[in-house]
Amino acid sequence: MKRSKITFGAVSAIAFSVTSGAFAETAEWSVQGTYTDIVATDCRDCEEDLGIIIACTGNGQAAEITVNAAAAETGRDGAFSPVTFSIDGKQLKYDAKTVEFGLIGYTPVFQIAYDDPLTEALQAGHQAKVTFNGEQSLIGLNGSRSALDLFKAHCGWTPEGFQQNLARGESQSTDQSQLPGQPPQQTELPPYSQSVLSSSPPMPDDDGMFWYTGDGFGGGSPKTLRYALPESDAAVLFASCERRDDDGVLAEIYLAFGDLEASAPVTLEITHARGNSRFSGSVFIEGEEHAGSRFVIADGDPIWQAIAASEKISIGI
């Protein structure tokens, strides 16, 4: 996390025990920083009395949560232990890494994705009871709704915030070697396909594109898979279990196909950690902004697991 934004004083464990009492009821949530440097805390201008710190790690990416209020006097640095949040009768459990922060103690640290239910629970609740290492502590939620709304917008956890960060150049660069308007004939995709199965936050490449199901923001059908920039024409791959025939899954690749005309035969080659896979298909041209190559991949084809198991893949027409 970007700890330079927060000052940690050399305080004893007694200072944090205050968080579980009346102080937790009166403290008000606030944010520091802007855009992907934003940090949300449960206390405004109180430095060492912070009970929880939620730090953005990148545009649309996970937030790192440090629960100082739950710090223990004993523990093992680097060990993983469960931390449980009980908020208005709802319990959420996470596998947290134990981090020793000097005199603060052995503190649980974990990450959540943009669509994790903890964020909504913190915004809707009145108080959070945290259980860690057999001990319980309380975190007040006064002002958490507005503070976390601002956090989500700046960290790219909303469609508008995500696009705003891209526009600011947080995750976008231009390939000067490519002619304007001409898609590449071959490209490499980074190792982010695993996020589709693990509900991890999106991890955009330099052009803002990433793997996702549905609409890219936690909505839409999980039966569609894309490597693209949500709500834009920038895309490389689309696959669907909804738009299909009896032979298998429909896949579209939006790479350049030269001077070929509609219905011309093409071959898709995917190089992955387990070797090469080739599929036969044809060119489709459905207007100036929707053209590429279309393929039908048989049910049960190992290509999907091969992609998920690869550090990167290369696709070409």
Image: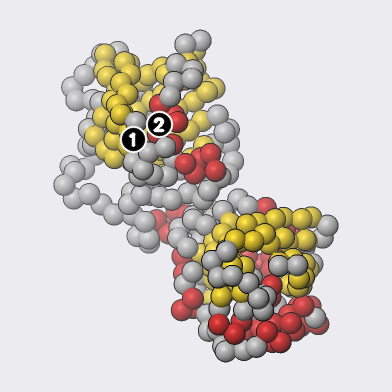
Describe the element under mark 2 as helix, strand or loop.
helix
Say how many tags the image has.
Answer: 2
Could you tell me which quadrant the C terminus lies in? top left
Contact, mark 2 vs mark 1 (Cβ under 8 Å): yes
Callout 1 secondary element: loop
Three-letter amino acid code of the residue under disc 2: Ala
Q: Quadrant of residue 63?
A: bottom right
Residue 170 is left or right of residue 119, and the answer is left
Q: Residue furthest top?
A: 246
In the foreground, 176 or 51: 51
Residue at 41%, 17% (x, y): give it. 296
Q: How is the image coloured?
A: secondary structure
Q: Residues within 10 Å of mark 2 (few under 14, many from 20)?
A: some
**Against 257, is 222 above or below?**
below
Q: Residue at x 18, y 50 (%)?
A: 176
- Image coordinates for residue 16, horizontal then vertical, percent: 69, 82
Q: Which mark is residue 306?
A: 2
Real-space CA distance between mark 2 and mark 1, rounded to the nearest whole angstrom: 7 Å
Quadrant in which residue 52 is drawn: bottom right
Q: Position of residue 64 (x, y in %)?
A: 54, 64
Residue 98 x %, y %: 59, 67
Say if 54 sits above or below 89 in the image: below
Q: Badge 1: few (under 14), some or many (20 or more) residues near its Cα, within 10 Å? A: few
Q: Amino acid at mark 1?
A: Ala
Residue 66 x, y percent position in the rendering: 59, 69
Question: Seen in the image, is 26 located left or right of residue 304?
Answer: right
Q: Is residue 231 visible?
A: no
Q: Mark 1 sits on what residue?
A: 273
- Say which label, 2 or 1, has the lower sequence index: 1
Residue 122 is left or right of residue 226, and the answer is right
Describe residue 119's horizontal placement relative to residue 34 as left or right.
right
